[in-house]
Amino acid sequence: MARFLHDRKKTIGKIPGSLIHLGTQKIDHTLIRFINFTNEQIIENEQEKLEDCLPYISDNTVSWISIYGLHDQEMIRDLGMLFDIHSLLLEDMLNTDQRPKIAETDQLMIVILKALDYDETNHRLNAEQISLILNESYLITLQEQEGHYFDAIRERMRKGTGRVRRKGADYLAYVLIDTIVDNYLLNIERFGSIIEKTESRIFLPKQVGLIQEIYKHKTEINFLRKNIRPVKEIVHHLIENESGFVKEENLKYFRDLNDLIVQATESIEIYQTMLNDQMNLYHASLDNRANEIMKVLTVFSAFFIPMTFVAGVYGTNFENLPELHFKYGYFYFWILMALIIISLVIYFKRRKWF
């Protein structure tokens, strides 16, 4: 399966809004975790069906419904029916190759993002799609598998620390998005450190496998760019929206989030430029080495061409060669060779050719 675009054969010929899971099934059974909270209390449990969550949802509390697993199309269909979500939006949530986006209806705001995780074994990034469905009284998150991204937030909610329990669903959505963006910066920092270390190896005598590493880094940075750059548009929309899903008092948090995502996108652009420069330096370094080799060979040939000419002249088989029977001819021959070499050395030194 292609990394930047998944196989879409299953969607060919289907009507728009068909609930087809595009991607890899990462969990055997769909899980539903439910949290209902106020400033004074919190209720946390696991539910077998989405219908079991409905009695808890009210205007006086905030509910967070976490759904793990996108392969259960029946559950996703029930989700659309229970919370009045259009089938086209559900289709986007099931497509794990969906570009990060934001959409609004009269009752809901839907944000689709990618959470990134670094694979230490294969030294590459993996992406997991996370969808947020925001209403004034609840937040629904859809993830491909049960992950660790939001464990710290749940722990703060249980202990009652921080602002989450005192704020609404929009602030909870901010905290989740902020966690995802912080993870972006962490991965950019990780790859940035690797890229900066690679630069020092360009001028080393041995560069085995270096160009392959640079190309791999370019692929990972492009993967980061593909999944992070659209988030800037999403955050900007959240700040500028007039739908009322984000309260005025919480806009300052989204503005701060905008600064982080701008920093992330700018850092990606910087490292993309650095990788392009590294590739140019690598090829320039190869050209310089080739030039040095050609320079040495040219210098040696410059020494031997006149010597070969003289030796060729006196190595001919003509009997009447004038100096052929000269008593000290051999001795003067080597003197001539030495003078040629010394003259060439002086000439090259003055021209600063070596």
Image (tube, rainbow, N blue to C red):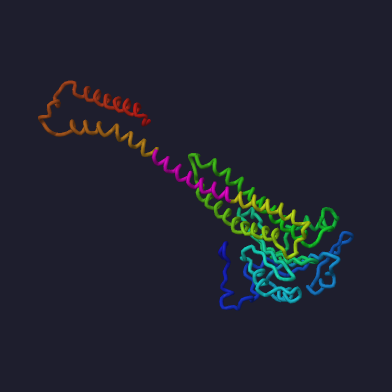
Q: Toward which corner of the image does residue 153 lie, by quadrant? A: bottom right
Q: Position of residue 14 (x, y in %)?
A: 59, 78
**Above-or-below relation of 187 to 335:** below
Image quadrant containing the N terminus: bottom right
Secondary structure of the magenta portion, mostly? helix
Q: Residue furthest top?
A: 328
Q: Is residue 114 magenta?
A: no
Q: Which residues are magenta?
A: 269-291
Q: Is residue 275 magenta?
A: yes
Between 113 and 283, the one lying in front of the other is 113
Image quadrant containing the C terminus: top left
Q: Position of residue 28 (x, y in %)?
A: 71, 69
**How many badges with numbers are in the image?**
0
Residue 271 horizontal side relative to residue 161, left or right: left
Q: Toward which corner of the image does residue 69 lie, by quadrant? A: bottom right
Q: Residue at x 65, y 73 (%)?
A: 88
**Above-or-below relation of 66 to 153:** below
